[in-house]
Amino acid sequence: MSQENVPVKIVTTHKMSYSYLNRKGELYGGQMLSWADEIATIAAERFVQGPISTVLLDQFTFHSPVLLEDIVTMEAVITYVGHSSMEVAVEAYAQCVGQPLRRAAGGFVVMVAVDETGHPVPAPSFLPRTDEELALWAAGQARSEARKKNRAK
C-alpha cells in the first residue's frame, strides 16, 4: 500500500486516577502534554513508517479541567506534511459517565521524519482529497509558513 494519500487518525483513551491528578484534583498539564506527544508520535510513525522526532508543541491550549472519574479521549490526525516535517493536530475531550462530553485541550505537534542517526529525511507525500483534509492542509500550511518566518527572526 502506497503511503501517498493515506490519512492517519489515531484515537486513545485514558481513565483518570489519583496518580494523574494535582492537589486540586485536576489532571497535571504536563501529563496532558505527554499524552499529546505520545499520540502524535504514533500518528507520525504510522504515516512515515519509520522513526520521527518531536520538534515542538504549538498553540496547545487547556480548555476545561480533567477530574477524577473522567475518561479522556484523545484524537490525533496528520494535517500537513512538508519536506521532512509534519503537523499533527491533537484534541482531547473529557467526560464523566452520564455527563456531556467537553473539550479539554488541543493544539498541534510538529514532528520530523528522521533516519537511524536522527538526521531529517524526506517524509512520504500526502495529498488531501476530502474537503475536510483540504481545509486542514491549507491551515496547516499557513501555520508552517508562520513558524518558518518566526524562526527566521
Image: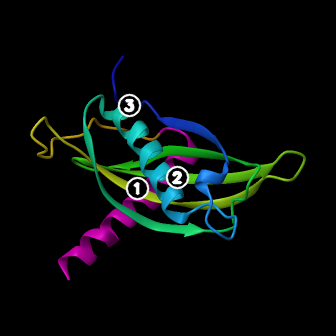
* Towards the viewer: 6 or 47: 47
* Location of the C terminus (image quadrant): bottom left
* Location of the N terminus (image quadrant): top left
* Towards the viewer: 94 or 130: 94
Q: Amino acid at mark 2?
A: Val
Q: Report if the CB atoms under discs 3 and 2 are less than 8 Å apart.
A: no
Q: Amino acid at mark 1?
A: Val
Question: How crowded is the residue under tag 3: few (<14 C-alpha within 10 Å), some, or many (20+)?
Answer: some
Name the residue tied to disc 3.
46
Residue 117 lies in the magenta-colored region: no
Where 125 falls versus 18 (above or below)? above
Magenta span: 129-153
Report the side of 74 relative to 24 (left or right).
Answer: left
* Gap between marks 1 and 2 measured at Cα: 7 Å
Residue 59 drawn at (x, y percent): 47, 69
**Precedes in sequence: disc 1 or disc 2:** 2
Residue 151 drawn at (x, y percent): 22, 74
Name the residue tied to disc 2.
90
Overall secondary structure of the magenta section: helix
Name the residue tied to disc 1.
109
Q: Secondary structure at mark 3?
A: helix
Residue at (69, 59) in percent of width and height? 66
Residue 131 lies in the magenta-colored region: yes
* Gap between marks 3 and 1 measured at Cα: 15 Å
Report the side of 24 relative to 90 (left or right).
Answer: right
